[in-house]
Amino acid sequence: MPGYNSKKNSVRLHDIYVAWATCLRVAFACAFLAFVSGCATRPPATDLHRDITHALPASEPTALGAALAPLERTHPGESGFRVLASGADALQMRIALARAATKTLDMQYYIANEDTTGKLLLAAALYAADNGVRVRMLVDDLNFKDIDRVMAALNSHDNIEIRVFNPFGSAHESFYARTSNMLTQLDHFTRRMHNKAMIADNQLAIVGGRNLGDEYFSASETLQFRDIDVLAAGPVTNDISASFDAYWNSSASYPLRALNKQKFDAADLDAMRDELRAHWRANADPYNAKPLNATPLASQIQKDELGLTWAKAEFKADTPEKITHPSPDYKSPPMESVIALANAAQKEVLITSPYFVPHDAGVKALGELTARGVRVAVLTNSLAATDAVAVQAGYSPYREPLLAHGVELYEFMPQQEERHSRVNFIGSTSRASLHAKTFVIDRRILVIGSMNLDPRSANLNTELVLVIHSVPLANQLAGIFDRATAPSVSYRVQLATPAQLAQLKATGAPPSDLVWTGEVDGRMRTWNLDPGAGFYRNLMTGIFMLLPVGSQL
């Protein structure tokens, strides 16, 4: 699901669009009929002039490949992994990948902002292109509504190509044209490419929950998304690259030049190069972009300094046909994999999903696990912390049934005390919101990627996950889960006891079947309503609960 773009004020735009578009579609249909009848349907991208390109063959000689080869021989059939739990680590590693690439650099993201950290990453990509690296960047259209000048300028570079996935409008089209496209093609519009991946030389890749934006890298003064990525090295990278190629060459991937009518010449590109160099000089140190670049990644790999844990793994991803040719019979490989692993659990399932909408089928499935003695614990956003009130409306009716089945529920607090741990959800006094998507099975299997546990990830958006069979990494993520569900970080949601209900009645407080407990200023507190949410969020939750948007959440 989408993130929050504080710079663009895109607070889960697709949820908002879905809600009002569903309710107003009929009312607007007549008004738009005459206009729409004169609009031509955009041809598939395969009808446009564009090159069909593919990932670098894994056998192609590169510095990264040469550095990894001895380790791969030592760990046959395994890939190397490093968890990127802090925003600084995640930013540094992405820049390091761009700097380490010698042949190819591929990027696939739902959101890509031209903010402070975005420009640092784009500067690193330009550096790679200037050194002969082929750069391919694929961005979903929903959060690419404005074709900003940095990406547009870089797209004029001979070694850089940017494509837009599933566009419903373009920069030169009017607001009315884009709106009509959305209203008349609602089913198509609500299906989005939610994948997040960055790949260097088909040897190293980063996948996980982070988009490209300040809020994902601990660089925003207003909002910090607590997220987790993983660096992958070795054979599994081939599968990640193959998935990227499928999207890159799909009929829904349009060259930016076909949507953007801006013209750039060599002088414009030189000016942008100077601007990005100045931006790097001013911001690389303050935003911790440099440390990993002091020693090249290939050298760190050769010296076994990168901290890779080797394990067997599988990569699971949706195909672009989930969007281009939707079918009610489609089964999402990432979702099916998580369900199968959870059903096979013997002791414990730890779920981190910021957007968690289980519906009746999910409640039943999780209840069957607890019925046979498996601990099931879920960490999601509180109403006060979420950037998606619509999703909270989809989740809240299932709290009581889940708790009645013995599922543990934790809801992430919006304010976090300052800590100085590198591997933690905590690290800023800005408003915090959970964004990581991880699943830990029996503390021996870790699943990490872009997928939330909700119908949108299962049925509408395309997603990807890595399934890693590693006790050390699973325990590392379980430790992060344990710290993230501590009373000072998350509320514990429970069914109210008879004594608590009696106390509420005696004090005149509104009746509630749920109570929240958490630690504030070093003291344990109890609430009978969603803590800290305020009137507006509660009102919006109630409104969304009345709207017929359940299938879109």
Image (cartoon, grey):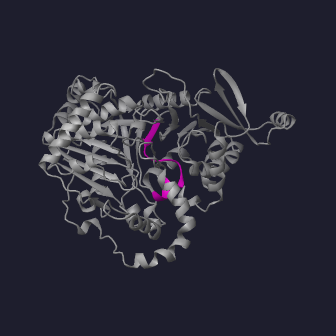
Do we see residue 101 in this rendering? no
Residue shown at 79% from the left, 41% from the top:
510
Q: Nearer the viewer, residue 264 or 520?
A: 264
Tell me if residue 319 comes above or below residue 471 in the rendering. below
**Residue 459 located within the stretch drawn in magenta:** yes
- Looking at the rendered image, the quarter that the C terminus falls into is bottom right
Tell me if residue 199 comes above or below residue 280 in the rendering. below
Q: Is residue 461 left or right of residue 513?
A: left
Residue segment shown in magenta: 445-460
**Residue 101 located within the stretch drawn in magenta:** no
- Residue 165 location (% of width, % of height): 33, 57
Tell me if residue 257 comes above or below residue 235 in the rendering. below
Residue shown at 53% from the left, 69% from the top:
25
- Residue 177 location (% of width, % of height): 39, 68
Most extreme residue toward the right is 506
Q: Which image quadrant is residue 273 in? A: top left
